[in-house]
Amino acid sequence: MSFSFGRNLVMHVFGESHGALVGVIVEGFPTGLRIDEGRIQAELDKRRPGTSAMVTQRKETDQLKILSGNINGISTGAPITMIIENKDVDSSSYVDFKRRPRPGHADFPATVKYGGHSDIRGSGVFSGRMTAALVMAGALVRGYLDDRGISVEARLTQIGGYAIEGRLPESIISKAKEDGDSLGSLAACTIEGMPVGIGEPMFESIESVIAHAMYSIPAVKGVSFGAGFECAKMRGSEFNDQYRMEGGKIVTTSNNNGGILGGLSNGMPIVFHVAIKPTPSISRPQMTVDLDSGKECEMTINGRHDPCIGIRAIPVIENLTAFCMADLLLR
């Protein structure tokens, strides 16, 4: 299993959804910088379950604990260890899933790969619960980015194919929940203030780093930059971002490349979109196969699940992106 990400700034994720805790160790964070526990906690609270009727009703406080690398709120240079404990755990509904894998979940391939020994409770390491570690690691570096004039903002742009203008479409989400169903979503993320020339060609391009990180979020099924797949419909004369001068700086007249050329930042806002699949745990009957008998059978998933994962994915996307930017700047 692989639980590490980053090159100069590295995170190591540990724990399980229904284990004692979820945590992260961050190596390479500069010495002598303020560690803003309040800000990290605030970001955790944004993805915390049980906060409204539109998310899972699992009740977790997600209280941050920093165990190392921090003296009086200042980084020491030692690895920074952060954890949250799992308090509201109910594994009773997961007992049968090794034998009857849930559609849309990792149950079947994980059972085969790990010989039936993987932790199925709450999906174990494959759970969205693990993204709390990504939020902690990313929130840690937000002050480092702030000091350099770099901001990261993610937002939902669609839920279930409906464009979001202002407030979330609660009626649409509630209807899906009442139907025992779930909704997919689309998010946009914008990074402003990155200097020109950050990134590397080929395998360490900004796109490569961000895409690698985004696909580490369990529900993400697509990532695109700038105009994304729309570029396939365009001519070069339409797509190319032409240069001009503005306030003594070189800027582009459009941003179809999403602020990245040749894997490097070009000084324009870095813009990308993330497609998030519908929550696979739905209460409608679905077909599966009993692995003991080899026979097809019907199953219904009970328990506490998000009707739309995308709502709580936003702070994950935002903070994980912040971690990527800090790692790129430290190279």
Image: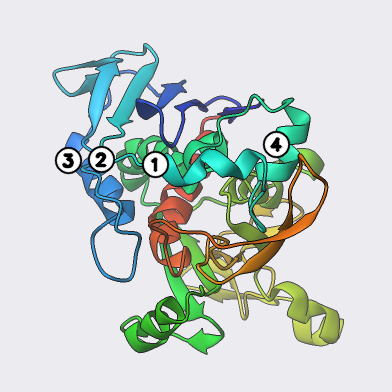
Cα distance between the residues tagged 3 and 2 = 13 Å
* In this view, the mark in front (4 or 2): 4
Q: Residue 132 bears which disc, if any?
A: 1
Q: Disc 4 marks which amino acid?
A: Ala
Q: Residue at x 38, y 57 (%)?
A: 304
Side (left or right) of 27 relative to 81: right
Mark 3 → mark 1, Cα distance in angstroms: 15 Å
For label 2, the residue is 62
Quadrant in the picture for the N terminus: top right
Q: Earlier in the sequence, mark 1 or mark 4?
A: 4
Q: Quadrant of residue 161?
A: bottom right
Residue 81 locus on image (x, y percent): 35, 20
Tell me if label 1 and label 2 are in contact, CB under 8 Å: yes
In space, the residues marked 3 and 4 are separated at their CA atoms by 37 Å
* Amino acid residing under circle 2: Asp
**In the structure shown, which secondary structural element does the residue marked by tag 4 occupy?**
helix
Q: Position of residue 184 (x, y in %)?
A: 56, 72
How many other residues sit within 10 Å of disc 2, few (<14), some (14-19) or many (≥20)?
many
Name the kind of residue labelled 1 in the image.
Ala
Q: Nearer the viewer, residue 17 or 140?
A: 17
Residue linked to disc 3: 38
Looking at the image, which residue is at 33% across and 71% down?
54
Residue for point 40% across, 66% down: 311
Give the numbered dot on residue 110: 4
- The answer to which of marks 3 and 4 sits earlier in the sequence is 3
Query: How many marks overall?
Result: 4
> Can you give x and y, in whole percent of width and height, for residue 11 in the image?
50, 27
Q: CA distance from mark 4 to mark 2?
A: 27 Å
Residue 297 appears left or right of 266: right
Mark 1 or 4: the one toward you: 4
N-terminal of the pair, mark 3 or mark 2, is 3
